[in-house]
């Protein structure tokens, strides 16, 4: 384990750990944040709040993707008379997932805006806080991108199954 380069680096590492739920999972009050008991409007609290909301978005997406996978399986197995109802269920779940992805992307985009852009009186971020925000933004954007890729692959596999069941060539349009 490397030693921190400076007190600023050490503070950024502790804030990042707190923001990502790592060791200690609390923001050090001496760094302008809060402990778990009370809260103030310090930037680290905003980072933690964003992180929690983004993780809730990702959990909802994962849960809905699992439901969609089950619906895909049922839609592939249903008899001809039940096909429309199964396809409707898949379409509703797909639309819901698309809405969840858009909401998560909008949350990330709003977090990407400079803090204090909405309030001119907000103090500028310290270099340590900026590093935490950037690291958290990259981590959560990567997680959202991975979920989106997984969703697209899941949809592609389902559509190929439908084409095969209808006797259509794979990848055709």
Image (spheres, helix red, strand yellow):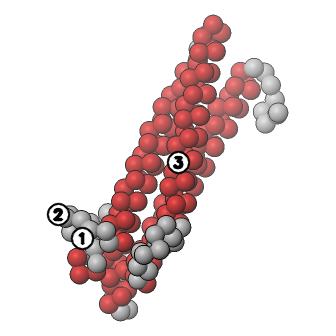
> Label 3 crowding class (10 Å Cα cut-off): few <14, some 14-19, many 20+?
some
Is 35 on the left or on the right of 156, as rendered?
Answer: left
Q: Residues within 10 Å of mark 2 (few under 14, many from 20)?
A: few
Q: Which residue is mark 3?
A: 103
Distance (Cα) linking label 3 and label 1: 28 Å
Q: Identify whether 159 is placed above or below 133.
A: above
Say which label, 2 or 3, has the lower sequence index: 2
Q: Quadrant of residue 91?
A: top right
Residue 35, placed above or below residue 144? below
Q: Residue at image x 69%, y 31%?
A: 159
Quarter of the image where the N terminus is located: bottom left
Mark 2 touching mark 3, by CB under 8 A?
A: no
Rendered image: mark on residue 56: none
Q: Residue at coordinates 40% horizontally, 53% vertically from top-left?
A: 53
Residue 86: image location, x then y, percent: 58, 19
Whole-percent x, y for residue 64 in the image: 48, 36
Q: CA distance from mark 1 to mark 2?
A: 8 Å
Give the residue displayed 42% in from the left and 46% down from the top.
Answer: 59
Q: In the image, is residue 143 above or below residue 44?
A: above
Return the residue at label 2.
37
Badge 3 vs badge 1, beta-carbon distance below 8 Å: no
Q: Which residue is mark 1?
A: 34
The quarter of the image holding the C terminus is: top right
């Amino acid at each position: 384990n490397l030693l921190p380069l400076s007190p600023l680096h050490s503070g950024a590492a502790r804030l990042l750990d707190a923001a990502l739920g790592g060791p200690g999972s609390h923001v050090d009050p001496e760094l302008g944040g809060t402990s778990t008991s009370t809260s103030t409007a310090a930037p680290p609290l905003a980072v933690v709040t964003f992180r929690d909301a983004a993780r809730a978005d990702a959990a909802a997406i994962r849960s809905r993707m699992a439901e969609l996978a089950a619906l895909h399986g049922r839609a592939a197995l249903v008899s001809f008379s039940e096909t429309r109802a199964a396809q409707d269920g898949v379409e509703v779940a797909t639309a819901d997932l698309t809405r969840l992805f858009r909401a998560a992307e909008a949350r990330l985009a709003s977090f990407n805006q400079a803090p204090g852009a909405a309030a001119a009186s907000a103090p500028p971020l310290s270099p340590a806080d900026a590093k935490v925000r950037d690291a958290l933004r990259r981590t959560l954007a990567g997680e959202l991108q991975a979920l989106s890729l997984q969703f697209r692959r899941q949809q592609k596999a389902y559509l190929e199954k439908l084409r095969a069941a209808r006797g259509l060539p794979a990848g055709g349009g």
